[in-house]
Image (tube, helix red, strand yellow):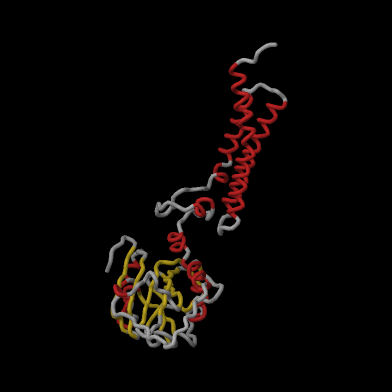
Amino acid sequence: MTKAPEHYTLSLMILETIEKYYTWALIAILLVNFTQRKITRTEKKRFATIYLAAILLVFEVGIVTILSRKLNHNLAWLVLALCIGLFYLFRNKALPFRIHCVECGTRLDFNHIIGHDDNLCSDCYNKAHPEEAAAEAAKKPKTAQVTEEPTELVVPDTVAEMDWDLWDPKEVCVITYLFDGDNVLLIDKKTGLGKGLVNAPGGHIELAETATEAAIREVKEETELVIENPRMVGKLNFQFKDGLSERGYVFFADTYSGTPTETEEAKPFWCPIKDIPYDKMWEDDLHWLPQALEGKKFEGFFIFDDQKMLDKLVTFEEDEQE
């Protein structure tokens, strides 16, 4: 009886080992796919695990065929090359996974690695999609607290004394600046918060509405203009001494149709950008709008007593402070 060459025996053992543990590899991939179903925004990565499983299946079929038909073991290299080729061909679909946030570089947790197609950490995703963050915050149930005596809310006079990490705005709104050449559309506010001041069109975000949708709707309601493609440029956080807390998302837009028309809420007018009447507007506008007009993104924190600003902190994209 002829003894099989040593290299033949070794290659046989390798192929049999691969065939033996293939099932466990496939189960691991399918378990990842099952876990992905519980994670939001994961369609691309769920398909990626299916692509990986399919490529692994092609490799397994090749190995089993070689073993069952007792073919030349060197054909396994051809099967491997075929699978590598398939992986390269579908690399964009089979390998969308990242270990670190593509925006800030923070190491992602397991759920964000196998899920969340954008490969952003939670903080970066919320910054990129403020309307979704606002909608999620609105969905969270408010915990009722029963006390024997109601406690009076004490609002500090300075931004530094506020715990902004735990701060939860009671209202979320939008404000939109529409530009036409060297002019910007402003309004004389006729009703509601800021009545009597000059402002830009804006209002509250309604349930099941994104910030972008709210910006388009509010401009239409207050000026009869229809804007397109508003872009978010900044965020404002207001705490009033009377307890009102409000977060506002600021939008800029350049495309519109229609003619500005006075409504019950506002009287719109075009104003040269260089002549914006800051002295007739909310006091905070002067501390962020000029920089926003220069293209800087920003976030502002303000303490107000009625229409009087008590303190401010504005940060810009270069991490400068005013």
Outermost residue, top side: 1
User: Which of the 4 image quadrants contains residue 312?
Assistant: bottom left
Task: Please give the count of numbered marks on the rendered protein.
Answer: 0
Give the left or right position of residue 102, taking residue 72 as reference.
left
**Residue occupying image coordinates x 51% and y 70%:** 135
Looking at the picture, how far across and down is residue 116, in whole percent?
Answer: 52, 55
Seen in the image, is 226 located left or right of residue 187?
Answer: right
Asked whether the viewer can see residue 277, the reply is: no
| Residue 110 x/y as whole percent | 50, 52
Residue under the image location 64 percent in, 29 percent down: 16
Q: In which quarter of the image is the C terminus?
A: bottom left
- For the point 58% across and 54% down, the residue is 36
Please indicate whether residue 42 sits to the left or right of residue 288 in the image.
right
Find residue 200 and report its image quarter. Answer: bottom left
Query: Who is closer to the viewer here, 31 or 183?
Result: 31
* Rendered residue at 32%/66% (across/down): 315
Say above or below: 210 vs 5: below
Query: Is 279 rendered above or below residue 5?
Result: below
Residue found farthest to the left: 322
Q: Which image quarter: residue 276?
A: bottom left
- The residue most toward the right is 69
Viewer-proximal residue, 148 or 70? 148
Nearer to us in this view, 288 or 304? 304
Residue 219 appears at what percent x and percent y?
A: 49, 77
Q: Answer yes or no: is residue 35 visible.
A: yes
Direction from residue 137 to residue 73 in the image, left or right: right
Where residue 310 sits: x, y (%)? 29, 80
Quadrant of the drawing holding the N terminus? top right
